[in-house]
Image (spheres, grey):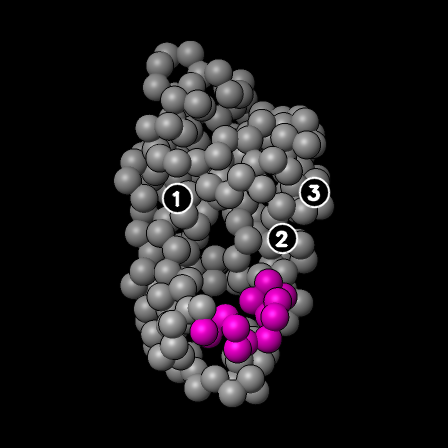
Amino acid sequence: MLIVFDLMDTLLTDPYRQAHEAASGLGFAEFDSLRPPGAYHRLERGEISEGEYWRSIRESGIAFDVDVFHTVRRQGYRWLPGMRELVADCAAVYRTVVGSNYPDWITEIGRDFLTGLGVDVYASYRFGVRKPSADFFLMLCEQSGVTPEELVLVDDKPGNTAAVLALGGRGITFTSAPQARELLGLAGETPRACRPRRGPG
């Protein structure tokens, strides 16, 4: 089996709204109503570059400070309580990865937060598709060499866990580290969610 952790609001705090607010000087609801519909999702899918995303915002009439955005974004990442320990414990015994809807900024997050944990990272900007699309999970399975039935997804969004359930895998809708640890079976000596990791990878 393969344990897949979502990244934002499952492992780390997500500064997405605060960074856009700080860079635009607008409340998020107002900002979101003015920017081009779907632009951020296109960025997450790798359909447009970061520069094209900023340009689309400015062409919508929003004054936007990219440097402020990145400063607030980088300062806003924090491990959620108990989650670094859970990922480390899980990866020490089971094959464990991160599967995220995120632009290529995930590369620096991997460097700054995931180094040394023994997890690979799969991201929407490389797949060209976002969760909860079944194609995201099927591509993850193809690249990691498992079947959909072997997936165990830990994710804060019910729509994403439902998508894995529909493919025959297991979904854990994340609320806290203790809850996820218990449902993964890592609170005791006999984990229930998946079999022990064998061999490389």
Q: Residues within 10 Å of mark 1 (few under 14, many from 20)?
A: many
Residue situated in front as seen by the camera: 102 or 113: 102
Residue type marked 3:
Ala
Which residue is painted at 58% across and 42% down in the image? Answer: 159
Image check: 29 left or right of 112? right
The circle on residue 11 is: 1
Which residue is painted at 57% across and 87% down in the image? Answer: 59
Residue type marked 1:
Leu
Where, quadrant-wise, is the N terminus in this rendering?
top right
Q: Which SS does the magenta portion mostly show?
A: helix
Residue 110, position as x, y percentages in the image: 43, 52
Residue contact between numbered discs 2 and 1, judged by CB atoms under 8 Å: no
Residue type marked 2:
Arg
Residue 46, position as x, y percentages in the image: 63, 64
Which residue is painted at 43% across and 36% down in the image? Answer: 174
Instruction: Give the quadrant of residue 73.
Output: bottom left
Q: Which residue has dot 3 on it?
A: 134
Q: Is residue 37 on the magenta stretch?
A: yes
User: Spatial distance from mark 1 to mark 3, Cα to Cα?
Assistant: 22 Å
Q: Which residue has dot 2 on it?
A: 130
User: Spatial distance from mark 2 to mark 1, Cα to Cα?
Assistant: 18 Å
Q: Under tag 1, what secondary structure?
A: loop
User: Spatial distance from mark 3 to mark 2, Cα to Cα?
Assistant: 9 Å
Q: Under tag 3, what secondary structure?
A: helix
Of the two numbered discs 1 and 3 on the same chain, state the one appearing first in sequence: 1
Q: State whether residue 103 is above or below residue 181.
A: below
Residue situated in front as seen by the camera: 94 or 77: 77
Instruction: Give the quadrant of residue 140.
Output: top right
Residue situated in front as seen by the camera: 81 or 18: 18
Which range of residues does the magenta coloring cover?
Answer: 30-43
Residue 130, position as x, y percentages in the image: 62, 53
